[in-house]
Image: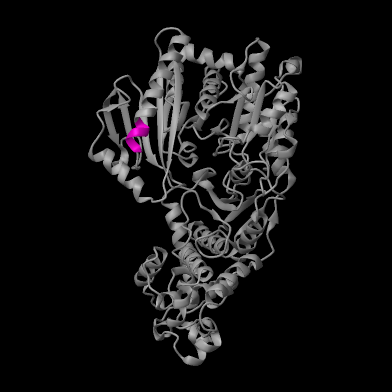
């Protein structure tokens, strides 16, 4: 493996120039020439024909507005500082500065026009648009965090593509080698879903891992995300990679990482993400992707791995043959994802009748053609499922998201125009948590490392805490994300309001929409034996533990600074009344607490016991507000009315407050 000479780089100046360009503040000049040279250097190392051609077209659009490369080379007006800066082409592509060795190599610098010749690019509309696109693509790089990588598939370091994935795989490989015990060969299992380029990114990762001396195991075909979380523990490997963007838009993809050993197959948390990111940046600034060692000597996981997952997951719920007639009629949709094949096999192993299916959404399709957004939470996403359910007379609708790690549930509702209503994640979490508490009371849900514990994210409903208190179980709140929920000691059930549930933490340590579906179908079937429905069970929950309901506000912004302004304003001038209710306390979690690490969250409690959580979204340009109201007074009917009235008032008040 040949490494490019790593010379000193003025990254700060380069970053400032890139930031100014991205903001539209840089006049035509040397920074644009440097940008083109960086883009050309990136194109040379991109192994993907599609993104390489895309980047080439953008460069050509900009060059077409000025002088030809031959004119630029002949005039000798290419900026001298490009050749003198001492920055290599590889460093340039990673850091956003101009490549120094381009002039010496006779490639990028020879093609780059002079500063003056780019003036036309700012007046020609097509060229100006191409130049702005290049600025966005090369203004930094896609950062690896606790959620791994996620972004739109396109050319450049701020997007998902084979070059970025190659750098990520090589950086992760270096991290695993560093963390390995002496004499131990690190290992990784790699899975992928049905999204665009998922299989390509997975094979690239397997080859790069094998080339770095890592034992790499590639899953045999596209499979749900929970299979990777399961495989990390089942195979005893050092890490797991899942190529997926879950329920993001069609042209997105992502790269999710799990750790084995003491992490027990959970998603990475800090400082692992920072250490992996440092290795990725090191690779990006010292090596071209085309220079990274590759090997096809990786393993393909055996079918026995998938069979083991099916067997373990089927144990979550079992329908005795004598009760098969009690199973509610179910409609299932895979949302154009990878859930169906595995889910149907688990159902068969658990003794359940195969459901009616939404045929148009059953097989993987990276275009997601029947939905505007492949997320079961989004309006309209379940319309085809509702239509199928009406035709079939179904009592239950189950929907996995495209990588099958989340679950949506809908039940009949005569008051709805569709005839059905989707339950919130909090409602499903409350019922599954109650089911887990009942199992613990019978002694069939235990934990060896700590007292049996129910857990949910800090923005999920307080209902689960009420269940834990009633059954004498321990309860824990965590920061948002299953990387935190899954790590709670003694966990017997955990969930987050965004449709994520972990019903079998002894099998895997991540949310799993398939095992959750089996557990919920088992619950519905058990209720049907006694003549009850899921709607009845929700009312019984309200009677036993109190009635809980939630509302959520998502304020999308075009300027991220607006989110900071709102959070700062709430801290600087705390509200005294919200929706006519007195504010009793405000907890600022930015400094952390005895129970939670530091996080940019405000927790507001009102005098009636309601709770409001305010935080910036971790994945989208949104401010998110979570409102939870409950009542234990009077009949179930009175509790519902009281909660609905106060919830509406608080939602209206918070919308006014953050508008």
What quarter of the picture does the N terminus occupy?
bottom right
In the foreground, 315 or 281 = 281
Res. 306 in view? yes
Q: In which quadrant of the rendered view does residue 611 lie?
A: top left
Q: Nearer the viewer, residue 191 or 618?
A: 618
Quadrant location of the C terminus in the rendered image = top left
Residue 75 position within the rendered picture, expressed as x and y whole percent measured from the top left: 48, 91
Bounds of the magenta span? 654-659
Q: Is residue 71 magenta?
A: no
Q: Is 355 displayed left or right of 70 in the figure?
A: right
State the residue at coordinates (41%, 46%): 557
Residue occupying the point 46% across, 59% down: 277
Residue in the foreground of this view, choosing between 607 and 516: 607
Q: Is residue 657 magenta?
A: yes
Q: Quadrant of residue 153?
A: bottom right
Q: Is residue 35 above or below residue 616?
A: below
> What residue do we see at 59% from left, 55% from top?
187
Image height check: is 349 above or below 56?
above
Left or right of 77? Residue 357 is right
Q: Is 625 or 142 nearer to us in this picture?
A: 625
Q: Position of residue 286 (x, y in %)?
A: 48, 72
């Amino acid at each position: 493996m040949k490494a490019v000479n790593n010379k000193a780089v003025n990254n700060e100046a380069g970053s400032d120039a890139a930031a100014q360009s991205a903001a539209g503040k840089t006049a035509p000049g040397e920074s644009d020439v440097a940008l083109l040279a960086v883009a050309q250097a990136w194109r040379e190392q991109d192994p993907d024909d599609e993104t390489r051609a895309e980047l080439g077209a953008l460069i050509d659009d900009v060059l077409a507005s000025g002088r030809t490369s031959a004119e630029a080379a002949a005039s000798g007006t290419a900026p001298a500082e490009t050749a003198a800066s001492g920055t290599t082409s590889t460093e340039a592509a990673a850091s956003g500065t101009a490549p120094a060795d381009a002039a010496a190599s006779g490639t990028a610098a020879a093609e780059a026009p002079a500063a003056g010749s780019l003036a036309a690019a700012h007046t020609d509309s097509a060229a100006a648009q191409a130049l702005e696109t290049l600025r966005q693509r090369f203004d930094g790089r896609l950062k690896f965090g606790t959620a791994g990588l996620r972004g739109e598939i396109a050319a450049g370091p701020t997007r998902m593509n084979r070059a970025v994935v190659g750098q990520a795989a090589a950086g992760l490989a270096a991290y695993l080698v560093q963390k390995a015990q002496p004499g131990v060969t690190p290992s990784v299992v790699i899975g992928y879903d049905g999204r665009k380029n998922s299989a390509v990114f997975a094979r690239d990762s397997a080859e790069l891992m094998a080339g770095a001396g890592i034992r790499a195991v590639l899953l045999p075909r596209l499979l749900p995300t929970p299979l990777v979380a399961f495989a990390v523990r089942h195979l005893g490997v050092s890490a797991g990679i899942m190529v997926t963007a879950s329920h993001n838009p069609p042209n997105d993809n992502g790269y999710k990482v799990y750790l084995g050993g003491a992490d027990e197959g959970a998603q990475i948390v800090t400082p692992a993400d920072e250490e992996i990111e440092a290795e990725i940046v090191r690779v990006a600034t010292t090596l071209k992707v085309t220079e990274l060692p590759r090997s096809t000597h990786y393993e393909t996981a055996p079918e026995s791995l998938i069979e083991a997952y099916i067997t373990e997951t089927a144990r979550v719920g079992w329908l005795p043959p004598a009760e098969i007639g009690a199973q509610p009629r179910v409609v299932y949709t895979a949302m154009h994802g990878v859930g169906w094949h595995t889910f149907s096999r688990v159902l068969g192993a658990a003794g359940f009748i195969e459901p009616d299916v939404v045929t148009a959404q059953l097989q993987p399709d990276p275009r997601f053609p029947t939905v505007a957004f492949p997320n079961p939470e989004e309006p309209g996403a379940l319309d085809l499922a509702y239509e199928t359910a009406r035709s079939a007379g179904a009592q239950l609708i189950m929907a996995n998201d495209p990588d099958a790690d989340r679950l949506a549930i809908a039940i009949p509702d005569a008051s709805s125009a569709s005839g059905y209503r989707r339950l919130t994640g909090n409602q499903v979490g409350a019922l599954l948590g109650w089911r887990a508490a009942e199992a613990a009371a019978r002694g069939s849900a235990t934990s060896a490392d700590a007292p049996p514990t129910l857990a949910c994210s800090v923005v999920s409903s307080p209902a689960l805490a009420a269940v834990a208190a009633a059954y004498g179980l321990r309860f824990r709140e965590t920061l948002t994300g299953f990387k935190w929920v899954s790590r709670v000691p003694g966990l017997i059930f955990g969930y987050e309001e965004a449709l994520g549930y972990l019903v079998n933490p002894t099998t895997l340590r991540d949310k799993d929409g398939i095992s959750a579906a089996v557990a919920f179908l088992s619950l519905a079937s058990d209720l049907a034996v006694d003549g009850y429905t899921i709607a009845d069970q929700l009312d019984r929950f309200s009677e036993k533990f109190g009635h809980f309901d939630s509302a959520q506000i998502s304020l999308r912004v075009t300027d991220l600074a607006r989110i900071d302004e709102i959070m700062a304003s709430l801290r600087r001038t705390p509200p005294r009344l919200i929706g006519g209710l007195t504010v009793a306390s405000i907890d600022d979690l930015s400094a952390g607490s005895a129970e939670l690490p530091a996080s940019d969250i405000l927790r507001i409690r009102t005098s009636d016991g309601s709770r409001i959580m305010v935080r910036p979204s971790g994945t989208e340009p949104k401010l998110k507000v979570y409102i939870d109201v409950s009542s234990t007074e009077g009949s179930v009917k009175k509790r519902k009315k009281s909660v609905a009235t106060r919830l509406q008032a608080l939602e209206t008040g918070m919308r006014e407050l953050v508008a």
